[in-house]
Each structure stands twice: as C-alpha cells, then as structure tokens.
Image (cartoon, helix red, strand yellow):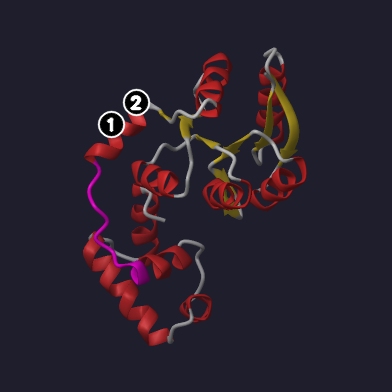
C-alpha cells in the first residue's frame, strides 16, 4: 500500500532533500510540498494526503497550528519534525492531535519507518523528547499572561500587544510584570525567551 505524503518546511533545501529521500521508499510518495504553515494547510486540503510531515518552526506561523488545522479538517495523522525539541511543545502537540514527534537529526530511513508506524495507527514520540517532557516544570503563567508574553515575543510595543490581545495597555503592562516576576526575568524579552525555551508559547 502506498502512503501519500505532504511535506512542509520553510527551508527549501531541507524540504527538497527530505522529499527526495522519502521518495526512494517503495511505499511512500510525496504528493505535495509547502514552505509555510498556511501553505501546508492549503496543500493538504488540495491533495488529501494519507499523512502530513511538518516542520515545527515555519515563521511567521508554526507547524503546530498547521498540524491542528490539518488534523481537524482532514483527520489525517501528522508527524512534527523539529530542530528544537522543547518539552512544553510536546504536550501542546499531542493535545492538537499530532501522532509523531521527531527531531531533525532523525535519519531518513528511520523517519520512513516512523511514518509507517503512525500511518498504521500508532503514536511515536522521540525517547529523548519524551524524557525531557516528563521532567519539565509546570507553566506558572495564566492563559492570559501567555497570550501577552506570546505577543511580546515578536518585539511589539505595548500598544500593539494591547490591540493584538484586546486588552488595555495598562492591563498588558500588569500581565507582563506578573509574567516577568513569575519567571524571574529582568524584562519582557527575557520572559518571552524563557517561555519559548520551555515550549509554553
């Protein structure tokens, strides 16, 4: 049985190399490629693959949002590939319906085997990522604080953050101060960096 794949990675060279390597497998065929999260959703909806392989980091969005949308719209399994295996992201990925989570250092032959496992109904999480997730500290930030810190991660001024999250500028400052205090961060950029490193945003 042939497994039809859609691949998404914002780096053309990596995406092309992966498509070529997976194409060498007798039972795998790449039916579509995308360079962004939005394009990944569009290509998946157009091609109706059996499985999607998405890069986690695809600015300006991310593979996690695309994975959730593809899973919700098409019900097909998604494997996320990442360079930065942040444990907090794993929890969010599993909640979004992602069935596979692997680092970019995974050899192509092993990725092909994981694709077959996931297509067969199983779930695969890289053991190192799983171990890190089991020992991660819980997120101390409230959902609203996370919204504000997520917007601050893009370097936006307070007024722009306030507009993005539909809050008054003073309220945004309060949320940022609370987040900085909880994370022991000297400024909002450091708070955003800590939240990103932990995979909370």
Callout 2 secondary element: helix
Q: Which mark is residue 131?
A: 1
Q: Which mark is residue 127?
A: 2
Indicate the position of residue 191 as horizontal and vertical percent values. 34, 61
Residue drawn where x is 49% and y is 29% of the image: 121
The answer to whether 34 appears left or right of 106 in the picture is right
Along the viewing direction, whichever of 93 and 141 lies nearer the viewer:
93
Indicate the position of residue 167 as horizontal and vertical percent values. 44, 83
Q: Is residue 152 above or below residue 109?
A: below
> Is 61 within the magenta?
no
Callout 1 secondary element: helix
CB atoms at circles 1 and 2 under 8 Å apart?
yes
The answer to whether 28 appears left or right of 184 in the picture is right
Residue drawn where x is 34% and y is 48% of the image: 198
The answer to whether 164 appears left or right of 43 in the picture is left
State which quadrant residue 176 falls in. Answer: bottom left
Count of numbered tags: 2
Please tell me how crowded label 1 is: few (under 14), some (14-19), or many (20+) other residues with Cα within 10 Å: few
Q: Which mark is residue 59?
A: none
Residue drawn where x is 25% and y is 38% of the image: 134
Indicate the position of residue 131 as horizontal and vertical percent values. 28, 31
Quarter of the rendering occupied by the C terminus: bottom left
Quarter of the rendering occupied by the N terminus: top right
State which quadrant residue 87 falls in. Answer: top left
| Region rendered in magenta | 136-145
Along the viewing direction, whichever of 115 and 54 lies nearer the viewer:
115
Please tell me how crowded label 2 is: few (under 14), some (14-19), or many (20+) other residues with Cα within 10 Å: few
The answer to whether 177 appears left or right of 78 in the picture is left
Residue drawn where x is 46% and y is 61% of the image: 153
């Amino acid at each position: 049985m042939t497994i039809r794949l859609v691949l998404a990675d914002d780096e053309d060279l990596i995406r092309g190399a992966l498509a070529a390597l997976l194409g060498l497998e007798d039972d795998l065929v790449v039916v579509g490629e995308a360079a962004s999260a939005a394009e990944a959703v569009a290509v998946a909806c157009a091609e109706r693959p059996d499985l999607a392989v998405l890069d986690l980091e695809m600015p300006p969005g991310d593979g996690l949002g695309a994975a959730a949308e593809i899973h919700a719209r098409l019900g097909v399994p998604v494997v996320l590939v990442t360079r930065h295996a942040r444990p907090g992201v794993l929890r969010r990925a599993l909640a979004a319906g992602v069935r596979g989570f692997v680092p970019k250092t995974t050899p192509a032959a092993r990725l092909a085997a994981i694709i077959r496992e996931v297509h067969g109904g199983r779930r695969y999480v890289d053991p190192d990522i799983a171990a890190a997730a089991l020992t991660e500290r819980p997120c101390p930030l409230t959902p609203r604080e996370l919204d504000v810190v997520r917007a601050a991660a893009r370097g936006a001024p307070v007024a722009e953050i306030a507009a993005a999250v539909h809050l008054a500028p003073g309220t945004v400052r309060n949320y940022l101060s609370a987040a900085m205090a909880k994370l022991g961060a000297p400024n909002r950029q450091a708070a955003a960096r800590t939240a990103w490193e932990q995979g909370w945003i």
